[in-house]
Image (cartoon, rainbow, N blue to C red):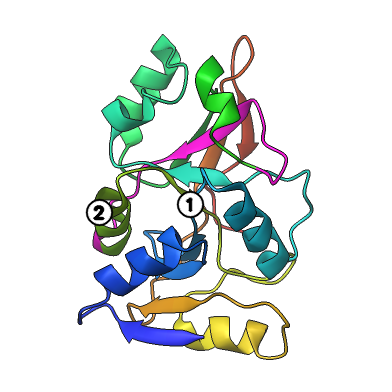
Amino acid sequence: MRILSADGDWLEVALEVIRSGGVVAHATETCYGLACDICNQQAVARLFRVKRRPENQPVSALFTSISHAQRYVEWPQRAAELAGKYLPGPLTLVLPLLGAEMRRIFPTPKGGKTIGVRISPHPVAIALVEAFGKPITTTSANIHGEPNPYSTSEILHQFEAAKEQPDLIIDSGTLPRNPPSQVIDLTAEGERILRSAKRE
């Protein structure tokens, strides 16, 4: 794994990794996350191998803004209400993909009909998705079942013996141990809280 400081010239290197189908670990407002091109099926498949994530557990997508997300997903009134109140921030809204986007967005290696929408206020996450120009994956930078990582050293420790690893880490130092984002499913009538934002 290559490591670059978030205080240095990391952006073009990170973009090249993502454009070539690689996986980048970077800070968010919750923990470190893993980014790849969510429109690249092979890149998503590699991300799942790196995380050892079951293929039936979709990852979310990071967008630059509400208007950016609306180009890819259906946006009911309740999504507008929640987004207006909590985004950017630690909230994931699960929404139906627009018809054409079901063939271009891969929340799992086999695709999917819905996607978790994330808009992060963290400057590194913002810079990465804005510069890439398309949605990227966002999922915690841990091996499946292991603790969420809040530092580069924690990522290195988890992956030290792994056959497949992230290609690049953007080191933003040790992050506050914030809880994961709250996840609200708006794909059916009403809403379901899939994950609470409360600390354990």
Q: Single out the residue that lies furthest toward the front.
A: 20
Depth check: give the residue in front, 199 or 111.
111
Please name the residue that numbered disc 2 is placed on.
131
- Residue type, label 1: Asp
Dot 2 or dot 1, earlier in sequence: 1
- Residue type, label 2: Ala
Label placed on residue 37 = 1
Label placed on residue 170 = none
The picture places residue 140, in percent across and down from the top left corner, at 56, 61
The picture places residue 194, in percent across and down from the top left corner, at 65, 36
Work out which quarter of the rendered image holds the C terminus and state it: bottom right
Q: Is residue 182 left or right of residue 16?
A: right
Secondary element under disc 2, as helix, strand or loop, is: helix
User: Magenta stretch: residue 109 in it?
Assistant: yes
Q: Which residues are magenta?
A: 108-123
Taking the spot 37% from the left edge, 30% from the top edge, the residue there is 69
Residue 98 seen in this snapshot: no
When the figure is inspected, residue 186 is found, relative to residue 1, above or below; the finding is above
Taking the spot 52% from the left edge, 61% from the top edge, the residue there is 21
Q: CA distance from mark 2 to mark 1?
A: 12 Å
The 10 Å Cα crowd at callout 1, few under 14, some 14 to 19, many 20 or more, is many
Q: Which quarter of the picture shows residue 114?
A: top right
Contact check, label 2 and label 1, Cβ < 8 Å: no
Residue 172 seen in this snapshot: yes
Depth check: give the residue in front, 96 or 148.
96
When the figure is inspected, residue 175 is found, relative to residue 96, above or below; the finding is below
Depth check: give the residue in front, 12 or 189.
12
The picture places residue 57, in percent across and down from the top left corner, at 73, 45
The 10 Å Cα crowd at callout 2, few under 14, some 14 to 19, many 20 or more, is few
Taking the spot 62% from the left edge, 89% from the top edge, the residue there is 157
Q: Is residue 101 left or right of residue 87?
A: right
